[in-house]
Image (spheres, helix red, strand yellow):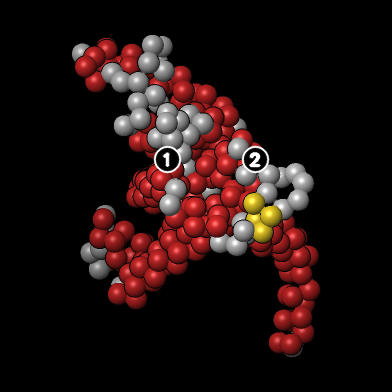
């Protein structure tokens, strides 16, 4: 099979997936951007208002608070999920039965319903019957007991542990697979040269899986910016928008306030912000890989 035939075969094989992706992802994004130029309640006629929705977004304090909370989520995901998952992948790298069991246990939240995860953490944080405040009582730190989800000053930070716990298993599996794909001869040669422990990780393993780390960072950013279900189950964006994210604000604006045009404009902003953050992360991580 020559190169031209091979390319045609590949394109023919990819065509169905690309068609489905275009219909269910690209087309809705374009339509959402289109509806952002209208004042529309979801029913009846649409009124073209140009950039009025986007101008309102710029002056909307709730939008900026939602963006700030989303940035907190992005940072928590990138600097929480990725390092923890990488450390666990290194620790649980061997294929013993205990390490296989631990990898499966850490991955378990990925197969659990987000509703279940949200309810579990709601009980953990419950001010009266929650295990967290109970443990603080037990160790004599009663003064540290708080209303974790109803205090506007700490509520957004209380959502970070369940966020990390929910997805760290995914990146653990990704990094474990990448580490297992490194040829054993490279590790043997590095050990002969005296590169053991953290030196082997820093100078051998990490550079060889750096492209995997880049993919994980992209997944973290995109996943954090569209976070919705966990926050909606646990706090519904409250109290007083303290845990409002861009996705929950878009949902509330669209389906609670019946401002479909404004909600569409917010969703378009989410896409643009995602592209900017992902592009920035790729630029920074590419500089890191070039410097190695």
Camera sees residue 85: no
Indicate which label's residue lies in the foreground, 1 or 2: 2
Give the class, few, some or many, for how many residues have Cα within 10 Å of label 2's Cα (few <14, many ≥20): some
Quadrant where the N terminus lies? Answer: bottom right
Q: CA distance from mark 1 to mark 2?
A: 33 Å
Please give left or right for residue 262 compared with residue 180 in the image: right
Q: Give the percent coordinates (x, y) of residue 120.
A: 49, 23
Q: Give the percent coordinates (x, y) of residue 218.
A: 47, 59
Compare marks 1 and 2 and give the one earlier in the sequence.
Answer: 1
SS at mark 2 in the image: loop
What residue do we see at 77% from left, 46% from top? 44
Q: Above or below — where is 165 with respect to 218? A: above
Camera sees residue 31: yes
Residue picked out by circle 1: 164
What residue do we see at 29% from left, 65% from top? 203
What residue do we see at 58% from left, 50% from top? 262
Q: Is 280 or 165 nearer to us in this picture?
A: 280
Total tally of numbered discs in the picture = 2
What residue do we see at 52% from left, 24% from top? 119
Q: Does the CB distance between marks 1 and 2 fall below 8 Å?
A: no
| Quarter-of-image position of residue 49 | bottom right
Residue picked out by circle 2: 258
Q: Give the percent coordinates (x, y) of residue 118.
A: 51, 28
Q: Give the percent coordinates (x, y) of residue 213.
A: 42, 59
Q: Above or below — where is 269 with respect to 18? A: above
Give the class, few, some or many, for how many residues have Cα within 10 Å of label 1's Cα (few <14, many ≥20): many
Q: Is 2 or 276 nearer to us in this picture?
A: 276
SS at mark 1 in the image: helix
- The disc placed on residue 118 is none
Q: Above or below — where is 87 with respect to 159? A: below
């Amino acid at each position: 099979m020559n190169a031209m035939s091979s390319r045609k075969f590949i394109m023919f094989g990819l065509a169905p997936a690309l068609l489905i992706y275009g219909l269910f992802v690209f087309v809705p994004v374009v339509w959402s951007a289109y509806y952002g130029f209208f004042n529309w309640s979801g029913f009846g006629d649409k009124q073209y208002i140009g950039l009025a929705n986007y101008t309102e977004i710029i002056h909307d304090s709730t939008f900026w608070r939602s963006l700030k909370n989303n940035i907190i989520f992005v940072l928590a995901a990138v600097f929480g999920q990725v390092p923890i998952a990488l450390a666990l992948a290194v620790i649980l790298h061997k294929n013993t039965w205990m390490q296989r069991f631990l990898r499966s246990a850490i991955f378990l939240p990925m197969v659990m319903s987000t509703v279940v995860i949200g309810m579990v953490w709601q009980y953990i944080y419950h001010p009266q019957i929650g295990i967290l405040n109970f443990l603080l009582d037990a160790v004599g730190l009663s003064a540290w007991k708080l209303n974790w989800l109803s205090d506007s000053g700490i509520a957004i930070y209380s959502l970070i542990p369940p966020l990390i716990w929910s997805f760290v298993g995914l990146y653990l599996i990704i990094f474990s697979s990448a580490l297992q794909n490194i040829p054993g001869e490279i590790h043997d040669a590095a050990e002969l040269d005296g590169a053991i422990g953290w030196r082997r990780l820093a100078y051998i393993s990490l550079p060889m899986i750096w492209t995997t780390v880049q993919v994980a960072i992209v997944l973290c950013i995109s996943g954090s910016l569209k976070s919705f279900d966990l926050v909606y189950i646990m706090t519904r964006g409250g109290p007083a928008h303290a845990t409002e994210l861009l996705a929950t604000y878009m949902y509330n604006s669209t389906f609670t306030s019946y401002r479909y045009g404004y909600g569409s404009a917010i969703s378009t902003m989410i896409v643009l912000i995602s592209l900017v953050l992902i592009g920035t992360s790729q630029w920074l991580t590419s500089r890191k890989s070039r410097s190695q």
